[in-house]
Image (cartoon, coloured by chain):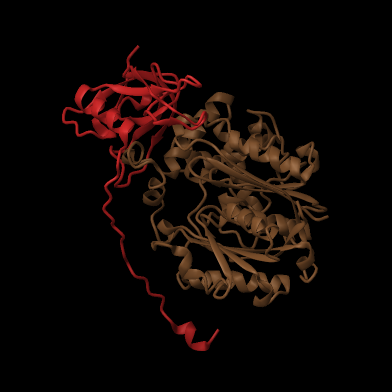
Amino acid sequence: MSEWLQDVKDLTLKGQIKVPYTWSVGEVGSRFLVALRDEKKIIGNRCNSCNTVYVPPRKNCGKCFKDIDEWAELGSEGIVTAYTIVRYEYPLQPAKAPFAYAIIKLDGADVGFVHIIKEDMDKLKIGVRVRARFKEDRKGNILDIDSFTIIKS
Amino acid sequence: MDKIAIVGASQTKYVRRKKSEIFYDMVYEVTTKAMEDAGYTLEDIDSVITISNDFWDGRTISCMAVQEAAGAHDKNVSTIEGDGAFGAFYGAMRVLSGFGTTLVVAHSKGSEGDLKVITNAMFDPIYHRPLGLDAISSSALQASVYMERYGITEQQCALVSVKNHKNAKNNPYAQLPMDITVDDVMRSKKIADPIKLLDCSPISDGAAAIIIANEERAKKAKTKPVWIKGIAHCSDAYFLGDRDLADPVSLKDASKKAYTMAEIKDPVSEIDVVELYDAFSYMEPLWLEGMGICDAGQGGQLIEKGITVMGGKLPVNPSGGVLSAHPVLVAGLVRIIEATLQLRGEGGAHQIKGAKTVLAHGINGPCGQSHCVWILGSE
């Protein structure tokens, strides 16, 4: 290395890439989000080949590689199958830490549904029963479900 | 499969922040050193694979910016956006399909972007990204279901951190050589239950490169060839809720395929060293279960019984693993390089004496959605 390089002060440049996107939600996704927004209902769909009930619904089954055409209305309650209480914060989180992420097996579904739990962190464990709490002002997105709340037994 | 070998390997030292070096510098450094290692010049390199990620680099088609640094300006160059073990797989395929040699180079600077924002972007923009999920919180979900199902304890996971940071003391390239205790891990800051700070791999900067050659061209290299005996990768569902997070089926499938290819019948007795992708401490026992090193749920006992420590029956991550340096994308390639050093007998202070068969492993996607398994041999 040349001698003069040893006297170089390392500079950095700050930058940010901010790109607006407009993602298509798709046919089944649109029906799912409209049901959240207009009816406060969680809907999934069933693969007639393997009988798996998916939520959110899918247009086709990745395992069977077949189209899905049967809708399934699910309950707004379910069981927590995995959870973590997050202790850190960053701007993309929809709630103030500590809050929890959970995978919830909704009544009538065969796959887990990922969402958040904001209250009763001390009562949270795998196997607890939870219920969806919908927002008053719903816009047709996944956060129309504000969070899930633990059902007191 | 035709005989193909790794004939050159190099890596940078991994640090929290490489302020003096841009991506180009790091790629140039490891490309040059890998060729020196093999005793090759640029004329000996038939094709090049670069490994980079646009979000981490903060530039689109990030591969294009490092092609000259990779010695590729007049060569057939292609790219992988994903972990280095998968990029090396592509490199191996290129050699098998007719290129005499392929250089595979990966670079990453965790220090320049934002881990949480970038890893949030790997999730589905409609259903999961608005929840704020990232690599840490999604992995914590996996840890919770794995530990609950099998009674894996936080102390057992802590032992993995203790072991790997201790191993890193013998690896001059590692970022975090440390003498820590189980108590230190247990008392470290809670991040996302059950994951604590010392269960996490660090943010790292670094680069690595290997050269893969066919049998004929391997003869021209000055290094002892490290033969690729078996390679496979398999993938699981994208949505976390569709998977059983405590059952790494894609790793089971990839391992079985790689073992069959390498004619390994009993991995525990036939493999001498494992270098696996432990982004979090819980991953080491879970991946060992997926590799068939032990039965489901027995991963915690492996570490307690001292089987995976230096001097144990099957040392795991003698380099210190990903817990001791986590340059994203590069880390899976580093596992292959560490396996190569072990098989050449060049592991220095972390050499496992007489290693003849080594397993190297990389992951892609949230919670190890896909796994790439390499069986490398000295003979």
| Residue A90 x, y percent position in the rendering | 32, 47
Q: Is residue B156 something that shows in the picture? A: no
On the question of residue B219 being in view, the answer is yes
Q: Observer-nearest residue: B42 or A94? A: B42
The residue at 52%/32% (across/down) is B245
- The chain coloured brown is B
**Going by the image, does A109 lie left or right of A27?**
right
B68 and A16: which one is in front? B68
**Compared with residue B241, is residue B71 higher up or lower down, i.e. above or below?**
below
Considering the image in quadrants, where does the C terminus of chain B appear? bottom right
How far across and down, in percent of the image, does residue A92 sit? Answer: 30, 45
Q: Is residue A115 above or below residue B79?
A: above
Q: Based on the displayed image, in which of its 4 quarters is residue B269 positioned?
A: top right
Q: Position of residue B125 (x, y in %)?
A: 34, 42
- The x, y position of residue B184, in whole percent, is 53, 43
Q: Residue furthest top?
A: A153
Relative to residue B134, is residue B265 drawn left or right? right
**Left or right of residue A132, residue B373 in this image:** right
Q: The chain drawn red is chain what? A: A
Nearer-the-camera pick, B337 or B54: B54
Residue at point 52% right, 49% down?
Answer: B201
Figure disc tally: 0
Give me the residue at 19% from left, 34% from top: A139
